[in-house]
């Protein structure tokens, strides 16, 4: 948003009060409770609505509620939000909240439906920017569907849609102007723009959004949940990496595989403990991070890694992922060999990797296949391993 003429941002945001109207008893949305208190993606609708404004640094919140909801409203709003008891009508509720601000009047006020939890920063900013040069501004969308006049389930005639808009909130006003307009108004009103127009105020139309829906029916909640899920996905950075490794057999009496010493009539040859499965997994994580491979971080030319236990490498890769803000969603390791048989050890390997990586076992898969006696693994010259890792970063909070 612009900050023209309003000093620094803190001054500006204190100058703006946000009235959130949530006193209604509407239960058409189901579950027998007012819609603003129903859960949406695990939180009350009002929690999303409050968060949408707080995310923009707009902290001077006035929550207008029904007296029956006082306890949960206090718990939800936390410190800093003013709670005002609403009246019998929407108009009476807004007027009560405007009156509650009289002692320390803000310069501007945004009046928003509590049941519009998906309001976006762009819609809010559009209203605030318009208020820099207007006494009133509100978001709306032009009507694009054809309009009919109908009665008793029959179309009477088509109605012109030119110049018609669907009104949304937040509706923004100069505080003094809307306070005076409310006190001068008699009768009922659908919204505050109607009251402002009755007082002769010009109201600028700003861009609304199709996502800025007013939750009314049960189907609206399903749609809102889908929109929230899409926004969350847009805030996730999901990365995949793969790793591949081979070690040859040498004389010995067992192989380290995914952190487990598996008895065998041979061992694997390598600079470290030659744990081919753990190396492939480690490289998969480095790969997801675009951080090269084990050799970049633990050069084979460095004698300190001779005979090293491979969990050192894996732990390093996991820590690097965490330092970059990633958690490991899951990983999958496939060992390719005729012998030793992996099946009897697969659960122990899964548990060992889980312990090293600090993950629950259900996020780690260890499996094996033969190569049908074909190729170097089929001739039992060595063991190959493939691994895939999925890394996830939540790059932003939900609005
Ligand atoms: Mg290796």
Image (spheres, rainbow, N blue to C red):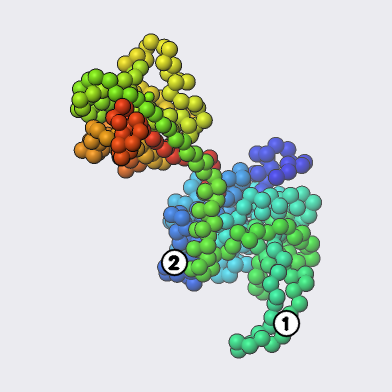
Gap between marks 2 and 1 measured at Cα: 38 Å
Relative to 19, say whether 262 is above or below.
above
Between 228 and 255, the residue placed more toward the observer is 255
Apparent side of residue 55 relative to residue 372 in the rendered image (left or right):
right
Between 240 and 6, the residue placed more toward the observer is 240
The residue under the point 20% across, 22% down is 253
Q: Is mark 1 on a helix, strand or loop?
A: strand
The residue under the point 41% across, 31% down is 244
Residue ID for mark 1: 158
Q: Quadrant of residue 329?
A: top left
Q: In which quarter of the image is residue 322?
A: top left
Relative to 273, say whether 345 is above or below.
below
Q: Residue 308 carries which label?
A: none
Q: Can residue 308 be seen in this snapshot?
A: no
Residue 68 on image: x %, y %: 45, 63
Q: Can residue 280 be seen in this snapshot?
A: yes
Apparent side of residue 320 relative to residue 107 in the rendered image (left or right):
left
Residue 202 on image: x %, y %: 79, 62
Tell me if the residue at label 2 has its CB under 8 Å from ligand 1.
Answer: no
Apparent side of residue 190 relative to residue 344 in the rendered image (left or right):
right
């Amino acid at each position: 948003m612009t900050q023209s003429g309003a000093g620094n941002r803190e001054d500006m945001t204190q100058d703006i009060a946000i009235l959130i109207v949530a006193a209604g008893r509407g239960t058409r949305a189901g579950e027998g409770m007012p819609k603003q208190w129903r859960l949406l993606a695990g939180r009350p609708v009002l929690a999303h609505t409050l968060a949408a404004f707080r995310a923009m640094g707009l902290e001077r919140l006035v929550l207008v509620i029904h007296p029956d909801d006082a306890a949960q409203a206090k718990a939800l709003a936390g410190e800093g939000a003013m709670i005002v008891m609403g009246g019998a009508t929407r108009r009476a509720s807004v007027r009560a909240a405007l009156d509650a601000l009289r002692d320390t009047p803000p310069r501007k006020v945004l009046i928003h439906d509590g049941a519009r939890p998906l309001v976006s920063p762009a819609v809010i900013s559009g209203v605030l920017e318009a208020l820099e040069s207007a006494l009133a501004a509100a978001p709306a969308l032009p009507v694009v569907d054809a309009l009919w006049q109908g009665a008793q389930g029959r179309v009477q005639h088509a109605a012109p849609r030119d110049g018609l808009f669907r009104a949304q909130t937040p509706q923004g006003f100069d505080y003094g102007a809307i306070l005076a307009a409310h006190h001068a108004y008699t009768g009922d009103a659908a919204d505050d723009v109607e009251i402002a127009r009755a007082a002769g105020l010009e109201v600028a139309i700003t861009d609304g959004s199709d996502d800025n829906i007013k939750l009314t029916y049960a189907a609206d909640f399903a749609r809102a949940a889908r929109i929230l899920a899409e926004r969350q996905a847009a805030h996730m950075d999901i990365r995949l990496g793969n790793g591949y490794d081979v070690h040859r057999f040498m004389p010995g009496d067992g192989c380290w595989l995914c952190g487990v010493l598996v008895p065998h009539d041979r061992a694997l040859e390598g600079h470290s403990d030659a744990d081919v499965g753990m190396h492939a997994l480690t490289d998969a994580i480095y790969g997801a991070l675009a951080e090269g491979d084990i050799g970049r971080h633990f050069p084979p030319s460095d004698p300190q890694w001779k005979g090293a236990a491979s969990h050192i490498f894996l732990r390093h890769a996991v820590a690097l992922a965490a330092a970059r803000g990633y958690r490991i969603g899951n990983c999958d390791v496939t060992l390719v060999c005729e012998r030793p048989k992996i099946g009897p050890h697969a659960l122990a390997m899964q548990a060992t990797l889980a312990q090293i990586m600090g993950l629950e076992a259900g996020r780690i898969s260890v499996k094996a296949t033969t190569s049908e006696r074909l190729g170097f693994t089929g001739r039992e010259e060595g063991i190959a391993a493939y691994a895939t890792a999925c890394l996830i970063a939540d790059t932003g909070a939900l609005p």
